[in-house]
Image (cartoon, rainbow, N blue to C red):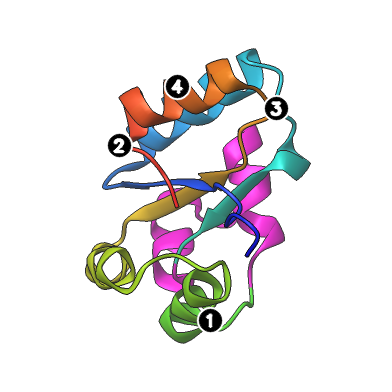
C-alpha cells in the first residue's frame, strides 16, 4: 500500500498570525499556488473586507464564493485531513479562523512543519 501524502495544516485564530506564517512560507520559496487557504465567507469578509492589500488577502479572495462553512469543511475532508483534526478546524473556522495547508517539498521543510505547525497527515 502506498504511503499517504504528507500535508501540513494549521489553524490560525487571527489574521496577523496567518499573515506572518504566509510570509514565512513565501520566504521559504513557496508560491501562492503552493499554499492552500481555507476560511468561511464570513471570516473572509471580516479579515479582508472588500479589498485585498496583502498576498494572503489576494489568496483569500481567490476562494470567495466557495460556500461558507460547508465548503470549507468539505475542502478539509477532501484533503484527507484526519477526522479529529477536521473537528478542531471546523470549530476554529466557525469562530473566524483561517486554515492554511502546504505540501513540504524537502525533508527540511517537513521538519519545519513538524516543529512549527505540529505535523501533518
Q: Give the range drawn in magenta.
A: 40-64
Q: What distance separates the C-alpha of mark 2 from that of mark 3?
A: 19 Å
What secondary structure is found at the residue carrying circle 1? helix
Label 4 sits on residue: 111
Residue 51 in view: no
Q: Camera-side residue: 1 or 53? A: 1
Decide which of tag 1 and tag 2 comes sooner along the chain. 1
Q: Camera-side residue: 51 or 88? A: 88
At a point 30% along the width and 43% down the height, the residue shown is 14
Q: What distance separates the C-alpha of mark 4 from that of mark 2?
A: 10 Å
Could you say which quadrant of the image residue 107 lies in?
Answer: top right
Classify mark 2: residues with Cα within 10 Å, few (<14), some (14-19) or many (20+).
Answer: few
At a point 52% along the width and 19% down the height, the residue shown is 24
What secondary structure is found at the residue carrying circle 2? loop
Q: Are marks 4 and 1 in contact (CB under 8 Å)?
A: no
Label 2 sits on residue: 118
Q: Are marks 1 and 2 in contact (CB under 8 Å)?
A: no
Q: Nearer the viewer, mark 2 or mark 3?
A: 2
Q: What distance separates the C-alpha of mark 4 from that of mark 1?
A: 30 Å
Decide which of tag 4 and tag 1 comes sooner along the chain. 1
Label 1 sits on residue: 71
Decide which of tag 3 and tag 1 comes sooner along the chain. 3
Q: Where is residue 97 in the image (x, y as percent from the top left)?
A: 32, 56
Q: Position of residue 22 (x, y in %)?
A: 53, 30
Question: Is-magenta flag for residue 72?
Answer: no
At a point 59% along the width and 54% down the height, the residue shown is 3
Question: Is-magenta flag for residue 55?
Answer: yes
Amino acid at each position: 500500500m502506498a504511503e499517504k501524502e504528507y500535508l501540513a495544516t494549521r489553524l490560525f485564530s487571527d489574521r496577523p498570525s496567518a499573515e506572518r506564517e504566509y510570509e514565512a512560507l513565501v520566504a521559504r520559496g513557496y508560491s501562492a499556488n503552493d499554499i492552500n487557504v481555507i476560511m468561511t465567507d464570513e471570516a473572509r469578509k471580516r479579515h479582508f473586507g472588500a479589498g485585498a492589500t496583502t498576498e494572503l488577502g489576494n489568496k483569500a479572495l481567490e476562494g470567495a464564493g466557495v460556500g461558507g462553512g460547508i465548503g470549507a469543511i468539505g475542502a478539509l475532508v477532501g484533503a484527507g485531513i484526519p477526522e479529529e483534526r477536521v473537528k478542531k478546524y471546523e470549530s476554529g473556522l466557525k469562530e473566524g479562523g483561517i486554515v492554511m495547508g502546504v505540501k513540504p517539498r524537502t525533508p527540511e521543510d517537513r521538519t519545519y512543519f513538524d516543529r512549527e505547525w505540529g505535523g501533518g497527515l
